[in-house]
Amino acid sequence: GVQTCALPIFVKTEAEMKLAEEETHEFQQKNNIGFLREDGNSAASYLALLNRRHDELKTEFNLLQKLDLDQNLDRQPSASGGADTATARPDAMNFAPGSPLGEYMKIKQQINQLKADREDLLQSLRPKHPSVVAIDEQIEKQTAMLDTYRQLSKDTLASRRDSLKTQMESLEENIKVWEAKALDLARRVADFDKLRSKTDRLKQTWDRIKQQLAGMDVYKGTAQDTVNIIELAKTPQKIQLELTKLLVLGSIGG
């Protein structure tokens, strides 16, 4: 009875297992699993790089919006590192000599130095002394130039903000494309893993039922070999004892 119930399950499981194997084989023919996994990892890494770059640009853009000109220049490593550091990155601020930002920083430093020299002179000279007056004139002249380069520098920062915004928009479009690619690759890999897992599960079930059926057959064969008929049964006959015999036997027994 148990064997009779297990046999249909075995047949059904075997059919499902073969179908799953065919689906897995067909999927492998249409998709190179090795390439899928490799491309999926590459897409995920590149997507992480794009997102990281977008975050950097967004942070820079927000700082350019919130901080004034001098605050933005003070936080730039290239502002005090010369032309070499200023050109270390393609999108870095240009502090090269002759550029608005470079000239602004140069004139600002000159004014600070003139003010320091003036303070030193005032330690021994009066404000109307020709030497002090000459420094005042230089400070005034440099301040006028500084105002000009301040406006040019603001325009430069405004252009940089626009450039950052354009770069972020381009990155956002690129991120969407690569998100779709990464999602598609991950989905196909997941589909294959699901098919393979289903096939393995059915194979394990099929093997287990097969072993159970084999065990039942062995037991059945053993029972047939050890049981033999020694003597055939005869037709039953009714035995009746006479009343006298019964009484005698009863008396003796009593």
Image (cartoon, rainbow, N blue to C red):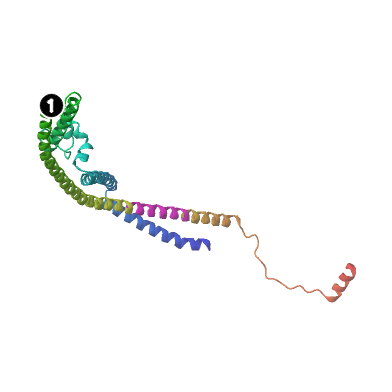
Tell which residue pokes out farthest to the top in this image. Answer: 124
Depth check: 219 or 112 in front?
112
Q: Is residue 83 visible?
A: no
Q: Please report the bounds of the magenta region as a residue range.
A: 192-209
Q: Is residue 201 visible?
A: yes
Q: Position of residue 232 (x, y in %)?
A: 64, 64
The quadrant of the image that shows the C terminus is bottom right
Secondary structure type for disc 1: loop
The residue carrying pointer 1 sits among few (fewer than 14), some (14 to 19) or many (20 or more) residues within 10 Å by Cα, namely few
At horizontal 14% and vertical 30% (from top left) the residue drawn is: 110
Query: Please, what is the three-letter code of the amino acid marked with disc 1?
Result: His
User: Quick check: 208 left or right of 238?
Assistant: left
Q: Position of residue 37 (x, y in %)?
A: 29, 46
Q: Write down the quadrant of residue 155 in the picture.
A: top left
Q: Is residue 36 magenta?
A: no
Q: Write down the quadrant of residue 55 in the picture.
A: top left
Depth check: 44 or 198 in front?
44
Depth check: 176 or 197 in front?
176
Which residue is identified by label 1? 129
User: Quick check: 137 left or right of 246?
Assistant: left
At horizontal 17% and vertical 34% (from top left) the residue drawn is: 86
233 above or below 201? below
Q: Give the overall secondary structure of the magenta segment.
A: helix
Tell which residue pokes out farthest to the bottom in this image. Answer: 243
Q: Position of residue 234 (x, y in %)?
A: 67, 68
At horizontal 38% and vertical 55% (from top left) the residue drawn is: 198
36 above or below 84? below
Q: Is residue 197 magenta?
A: yes
